Image: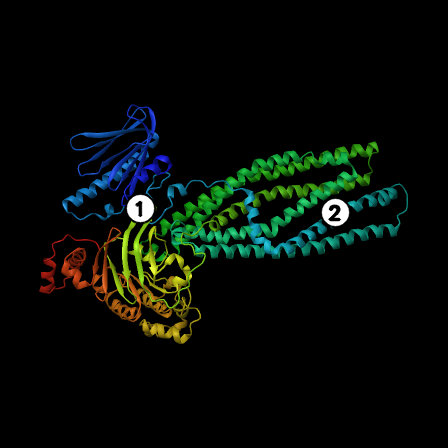
Amino acid sequence: MTGPEGTDLRASLAADENVLATLKVDLNPQLHFEDGLLALTNQRLVFRNAKGETAFWPIVPGMSLRLLDHGGVGTLELHTEAERLVLWRFTLGFHPQAIALMQRFEKLERRLDAEQSGQSLPSQLDEEEALCPACHTPLPPDSDECPACARQQAPHTSTWVLLRLWRFAKPYKNQLLLGFLLTLAATGAQLVAPYLTIPIMDKILIPYQNGEKIDPGVVAYYLGGLLIAALVAWVLGWARTFVLAKVSERIGSGLRTTTYNHLLKLSLDYYGSKRTGDLMARIGAETDRINLFLSLNALDFATDVLMMVMTAAILFSINPWLALVTLVPLPFIAWMIHLVRERLRTGFEKIDRVWSEVTNVLADTIPGIRVVKAFAQEKREADRFAEANLANLQANDRVNKTWSLFTPTVTFLTEVGLLIVWGFGIWLVADGSITVGVLTAFIAYIGRFYSRLDSMSRIVSVTQKAAAGAKRIFDILDHVSNVPDPQNPVRMQNVKGELTMEDVSFRYGSRSVIKHLDLTIRPGEMIGLVGHSGSGKSTLVNLICRFYDVSEGSIQLDGVDLRRIAVSDFRRNIGLVLQEPFLFFGTIAENIAYGKPDATREEIVAAARAAHAHEFILRLPHGYDSLVGERGQGLSGGERQRISIARALLIDPRILILDEATSAVDTETEKEIQRALDNLVKGRTTIAIAHRLSTLRKADRLVVMDRGEIVEVGPHDELMAAEGAYYRLYMAQARRAEEDAEAAGVVIDAASRVAAASAQAPRESV
């Protein structure tokens, strides 16, 4: 809710009230223009008009919204079963918002009806969608970035963004100054040769045509001067290119390293709204493009500018009028550059975006090739790639259409300029104002001047490419992490592992996920987090790991707020075992030692033994030096999980997070993993999430969550005796297990049947 009305309206909401949808109302009931704001919360409809008056309508079962439009005016009416309560009118520009609000209202009504009738709530009604405050499009789960807004064309890139590269060039300012001086000297040496054509023509060749003898000494003198000038220009040009290319490579390397390091420091919410292929393209292709611009094109541009300035100075010193004629094509070329630059800039930005889509298809398909083949979707992925590649081809064609006309036109204008110089020069020779030697030198200088002008016009393309790439790089560097390091971090010594959550709340955009949660986990205690899908278990774990920061309240480690501890220091005390373990390409030993790269082979083997992984590792062809392949695809799911447990064991964490560590394996493998986990949890503060509630019986306490709140806490036996939320979850799972077993033809013992039959609560998803 933006604007004054939205700010005032938000202030009038209750603490536990979430805004689900909004509608800007720009007409009053009398059809006069008057601004207002209608908001749907999880409890009521709220309307605030332009005068600051606020009205409320609590949502009760039986209410309905009706949407009408006539003559360019939309009407939204709130009805009960007996009467119409109120209506709002708006112009049809806000019709999409009205539809979204009405859909959310109907969803809320279905939820209220289900709760009133005591029926289980469908999972699709349980989630509260967040809406983009700008366009009111539903946001993806766990993301604050709106896909619809993200698809809008990015703002134009200014060429001035290239000046921001100075922060990477500053450490090499002395080398850059040396390169500039070498460029200046090399350019001056290149301008000597045309100047020497004046005496060669006027003192040697023309007198010879008039019958005078050629003096070999004079010829040798001028030819020697030409040779020395060429050698000096060659040496200086080599030195200049070497120095500046070396510096540009280091600038590009620093840019690439800084961008990657900054990317690693960003919080998880940034990655949730970005594609892997796009980030790879920025760090790879874009930095290469910038590096190429700095090492070659910027150097050529500087040389061209110096050559043109120095050439113009020489031309004016020889003959000002002929020099002025030389500059006739310049205004036209400058106008064309200005005209084409804008088209090229937008064109290259478009090319960057569509090329990222090509990379994204590759980044999606190659890691997921097993799924592609399993579902026989090769043609579909090939079509996706062909479509993205076609869009890339079309974007390049549009740029090339502009560029193909621009370049020959500049060449034509320079040829016309040369023709004008010839004509005016011949007239000056006939008039006796200049000699043939002066005209010859002028033509030589003009050739160099126009060739540099043509070269400078061509650099427009690469400059815009580099500017577009620099903008995409600085988009990453300008992004600030939502989980910042403190200015003066507290150094934790001898961490005990006590975790305290005080009034913790967390929101994804406008969606409240964790609400006023209080929990204390004692050092060495094992806590089991249970609850249906979407209850907030994984979000709570993410907050404890400080992948996100709490919106309200605090999480403390041994009495110290996590936000006061350096992120790296805190996470060294956390061991994480995920449902889908991620292994890097490399050896098994390298993967086990990922959290402790300096671990000895004895420490690695000891961790593998404790994780019950040593035996299967020894059966591999190269033991601990066996390559696991991309993402560990060379190993089974259970083997990957045991390696991830060994990885967690090796760093000896004080806090252990088990997120569905055994849910994706068979029963026999689960037993192996469970034995490994028994070794892992000893003496550590452990937080475990599991779908199979039976695996959490060893937990000291079970924390039952529902809609972001803790509803029950206690040991398994105590919660079963209370017959509350945990009891219903457990019995629903027991009934499901019985049905699965019966479907498989397995005989169920009588005790299990009695236990299942005694469950009265409806089935819930765990």
Left or right side of 175 for 636: left
Residue 522 left/right relative to 335? left
Instruction: Tell me which corner region of the image, top left, top right, bottom left or bottom right, holds residue 449.
Output: top right
Q: Is residue 38 above or below residue 754?
A: above
Farthest bottom residue in view: 602
Q: Quadrant of residue 617?
A: bottom left
Kindly identify which residue carries mark 1.
511
Image coords of residue 248 (percent x, y): 59, 54
Q: Residue at x 33, y 57 (%)?
A: 555
Task: Pick whichever, 404 or 741, lies toward us.
Answer: 741
Residue 339, position as x, y percentages in the image: 57, 35
| Label located before the other in sequence (1 or 2) | 2
Above or below residue 6? Residue 730 is below
Q: Position of residue 525 (x, y in %)?
A: 27, 66
Amino acid type shown at disc 1: Arg
Residue 617: tell me if it is visible: no
Q: Nearer the viewer, residue 483 or 352?
A: 483
- Residue 487, position in %: x, y? 45, 56
Give the mark toward the camera: 1 or 2.
1
Marker count (numbered): 2
Residue 90 lies left or right of residue 291; in this view the side is left
User: What whole-number distance in Å separates the C-alpha atoms at marks 1 and 2?
Assistant: 69 Å
The residue identified by callout 2 is 191
User: Callout 2, which amino acid?
Assistant: Leu
Split into 4 quadrants, where in the image is the N terminus? top left
What's the image's color scheme?
rainbow
Q: Quadrant of the C terminus?
A: bottom left
Residue located at (17% from left, 49% from top):
120
| Nearer the observer, 634 or 160 | 160
